[in-house]
Image (spheres, grey):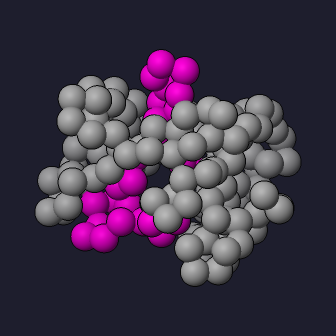
């Protein structure tokens, strides 16, 4: 993938977080303080997807967990009725890039289903409790995405 852009459509605090993460190889930004919204300090990774309309790489930070050698992320969009753009991008093209601290790697994204989703959902709620509130706000089942390293 070519160098991804930090979208100007993202809130300023997300853009700033991403820039700090990149500039410090995650030393500033890997653990992100979300205590103001009930989340405490949460681990974040940087996800790069390819835009389904633009075909350009797009970069953003996301809360993550780990399971069986893979990374796990949640497409919550704060409980909005529609999926986040990054999720739609990786459904269209599951080849993604991730950065955790200073480690960059490629991964294939897949949506967890059934019991795997239920188990990973509980794991992610333990990391970031507001996911429960987000699910209650929306009729859609919030996707849990597994990023399998390649």
Q: Is residue 71 magenta?
A: yes
Residue 149 screen position, x and y as percent:
62, 32
Closest to the observer, 30 or 111: 111
Q: Residue at x 80, y 33 (%)?
A: 102
Quadrant hosting residue 146: top left
Q: Residue at x 53, y 28 (%)?
A: 70
Residue 100 screen position, x and y as percent:
68, 35
108 on left or right of 102? left
Quadrant hosting residue 107: top right
136 on left or right of 83? left
Look at the image and give the residue range highlighted in magenta. 61-89
43 on left or right of 83? right
Question: Extreme top residue here?
Answer: 68
Q: Quadrant of the C terminus?
A: top right
**Would you place residue 104 above or below residue 12 in this image?**
above
Residue 12 screen position, x and y as percent:
63, 69
**Would you place residue 99 above or below residue 51 in this image?**
above
Q: Residue at x 69, y 41 (%)?
A: 106
Quadrant hosting residue 52: bottom right
Q: Quadrant of the N terminus?
A: bottom right
**Would you place residue 78 above or below residue 107 in this image?**
below
Closest to the observer, 126 or 50: 50
Closest to the observer, 84 or 125: 84
Q: Is residue 84 magenta?
A: yes
Residue 79 shows in the view = yes
Question: Extreme bottom residue here?
Answer: 53
Residue 15 shows in the view = no
Q: Residue at x 51, y 45 (%)?
A: 109
Residue 105 screen position, x and y as percent:
73, 37
């Amino acid at each position: 993938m070519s160098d991804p852009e930090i979208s100007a459509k993202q809130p300023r605090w997300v853009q700033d977080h991403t820039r700090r993460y990149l500039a410090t190889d995650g030393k500033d930004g890997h653990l992100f303080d979300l205590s103001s919204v009930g989340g405490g300090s949460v681990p974040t990774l940087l996800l790069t997807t390819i835009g389904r309309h633009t075909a350009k790489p797009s970069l953003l930070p996301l809360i993550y967990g780990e399971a069986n050698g893979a990374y796990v992320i949640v497409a919550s969009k704060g409980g909005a009725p529609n999926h986040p753009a990054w999720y739609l991008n990786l459904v269209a093209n599951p080849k993604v890039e991730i950065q955790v601290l200073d480690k960059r790697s490629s991964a294939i994204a897949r949506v967890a289903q059934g019991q795997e989703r239920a188990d990973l959902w509980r794991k992610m709620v333990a990391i970031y409790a507001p996911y429960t509130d987000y699910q209650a706000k929306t009729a859609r089942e919030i996707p849990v995405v597994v990023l399998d390293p390649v």
